[in-house]
Image: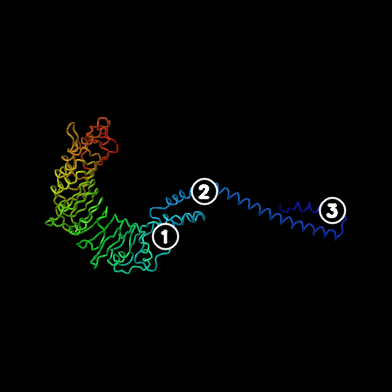
């Protein structure tokens, strides 16, 4: 209660009445007694305030305990923490949840998988490895981690930061090593890496390797390696020892035939391959054995010259996906590249299970409509076809081969996903007739041996005589058919 003028006046009146017949000594005694009572009451008030504050704290704590977030199992809360992180989090993202409260901090620090996402590390930086990287290394144990090195220094810099040794001591926990952000991967780095065991390494991107003529060549201990990416423009296979036979996925960029075939001949267990070759000899070497890939299912091939050599040297009986990028060499005067139909057909006969086929070609590729028809005729199981051709090979004659007529099935009866991006001017009736012939509205009318279109993208030139909306309506084409 606060003292006011009225309360003071009332007290004065009360005390005057009380002390009207008292002596001065008695009044002084009354003052001492009142002051003692005030002290006693204040001590009681402090004790009650402390008791009140304690009870308030208890109520808040009990409400905190009853909060739904505290009814979650710690495993589920850790899962939520994991999903709060972005695909490429920085250290602040990782620490944010640990700053909420001590319980969350303890849970976050005791959940190793929250700390397995490492930022790219500058291999040649000045000074030691940052403290937060070392903290990540400690908190992520014993789980496997993904490591990416980069170089921000000049191309002549070769001295590896001594602090990287701290990272290499945990090499047995590396599940992925990425050197693709380096300017080039220098031999000293390969030699130093090869001194350590990588028992958990499953993926390795070596980037662009320069001359690797080391004696002996660096040998990597990578018992679980399955995926490798490597570029080499020195005219030969890289002189490094890797268990090529255990690889299931390979990304390879070479500038010569010999180095490519030398590597591929050792990778016969591949399931997926992405090959870029900048130059080929005109014919395979005499006695060149056929490289047999018994497990290869997906092949992406980029060639800047005659493709015959590759198809003559490779067999892939279970191949399902084939993507071909065929272009002229950009640093030479443009020259016509022959389409080696016989070689590709022979390769396809060794690949009876092909379901996805994609062609990307330049103006210089000498392919005709007949060549294209021959290619799909040799792929009877084809379900997806993607043609990005700049040489007018997609014409009316080719489109007609996809047309279905009762009793006369098209060349590729299972084809249902078609994407064409071409430059040839096509005839309206041919295009819409082909689409409508295999776009039944009633699935009961679909012949059992013919697939109905499920996806169409026809980015072609056509002299339409009427609005596309009318054409779609007349031929009962759905709106998702892209013309």
Q: Residue 341: image x %, image y %?
A: 14, 47
Residue at 30%, 68% in the rendered image: 158
**Mark 2, residue position:** 70
Neighbours of disc 2 within 10 Å: few (<14), some (14-19), many (20+): few
Position above or below: 134 against 20: below
Q: Nearer the viewer, residue 415 or 394?
A: 415
Where residue 449 sits, quadrant-wise, is top left
| Observer able to see residue 426 | yes
Model colouring = rainbow
Tag shown at residue 18: 3
Asked where in the image residue 142 lies, by quadrant, the reply is bottom left
Tell me the residue at 71%/53% (across/down).
2
State the CA–CA distance, disc 3 to disc 1: 79 Å
Residue matched to label 1: 136
Tell me if mark 3 has few (under 14), some (14-19) or many (20+) residues whose alpha carbon lies within 10 angstroms of its own.
Answer: few
Q: Position of residue 37 (x, y in %)?
A: 76, 56
What element does badge 2 sit on?
helix
Above or below, comparing residue 37 to residue 460 in the picture: below
Alpha carbons under labels 3 and 2: distance apart: 62 Å
């Amino acid at each position: 209660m606060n003292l006011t003028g009225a309360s003071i006046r009332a007290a004065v009146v009360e005390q005057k009445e009380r002390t009207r017949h008292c002596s001065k000594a008695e009044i002084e005694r009354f003052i001492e007694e009142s002051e003692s009572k005030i002290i006693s009451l204040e001590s009681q008030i402090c004790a009650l305030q402390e008791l009140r504050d304690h009870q308030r704290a208890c109520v808040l704590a009990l409400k905190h305990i009853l909060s739904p977030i505290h009814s979650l199992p710690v495993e589920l809360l850790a899962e939520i923490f994991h999903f709060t992180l972005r695909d490429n989090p920085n250290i602040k993202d990782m620490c944010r949840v640990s700053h909420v409260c001590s319980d969350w901090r303890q849970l976050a620090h005791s959940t190793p998988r929250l700390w397995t996402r490492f930022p790219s590390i500058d291999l040649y930086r000045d000074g030691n490895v940052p403290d937060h990287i070392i903290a990540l290394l400690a908190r992520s144990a014993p789980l496997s981690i993904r490591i990416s090195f980069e170089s921000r220094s000049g191309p002549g810099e070769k001295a590896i930061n001594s602090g990287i040794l701290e990272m290499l001591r945990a090499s047995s926990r590396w599940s992925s090593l990425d050197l693709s952000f380096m300017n080039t991967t220098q031999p000293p780095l390969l030699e130093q890496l090869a001194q350590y065991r990588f028992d958990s390494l499953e993926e390795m991107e070596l980037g662009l390797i320069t001359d690797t003529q080391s004696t002996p060549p660096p040998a990597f201990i990578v018992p679980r390696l399955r995926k490798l990416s490597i570029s080499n423009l020195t005219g030969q296979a890289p002189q490094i020892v890797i268990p090529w036979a255990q690889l299931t996925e390979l990304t390879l960029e070479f500038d010569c035939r010999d180095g490519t075939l030398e590597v591929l001949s050792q990778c016969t267990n591949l399931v997926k391959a992405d090959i870029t070759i900048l130059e080929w000899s005109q014919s395979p070497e005499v006695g060149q054995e056929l490289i047999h890939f018994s497990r290869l299912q997906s092949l992406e091939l980029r060639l800047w010259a005659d493709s015959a050599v590759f198809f003559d040297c490779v067999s892939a009986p279970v191949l399902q996906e084939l993507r071909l990028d065929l272009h002229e060499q950009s640093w030479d005067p443009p020259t016509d590249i022959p389409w080696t139909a016989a070689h590709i057909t022979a390769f396809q006969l060794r690949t009876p299970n092909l379901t996805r086929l994609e062609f990307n070609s330049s103006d210089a590729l000498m392919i005709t409509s007949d060549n294209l028809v021959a290619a799909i005729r040799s792929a009877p199981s084809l379900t997806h076809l993607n043609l990005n051709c700049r040489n007018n090979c997609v014409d009316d004659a080719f489109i007609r081969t996809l047309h279905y007529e009762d009793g006369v099935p098209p060349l590729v009866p299972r084809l249902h996903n078609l994407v064409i991006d071409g430059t040839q001017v096509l005839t309206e009736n041919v295009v819409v007739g082909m689409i409508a012939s295999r776009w039944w509205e009633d699935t009961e009318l679909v012949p059992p041996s013919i697939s109905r279109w499920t996806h169409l993208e026809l980015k072609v030139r056509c002299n339409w005589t009427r609005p596309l909306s009318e054409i779609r309506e007349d031929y009962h084409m759905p709106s998702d058919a892209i013309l």
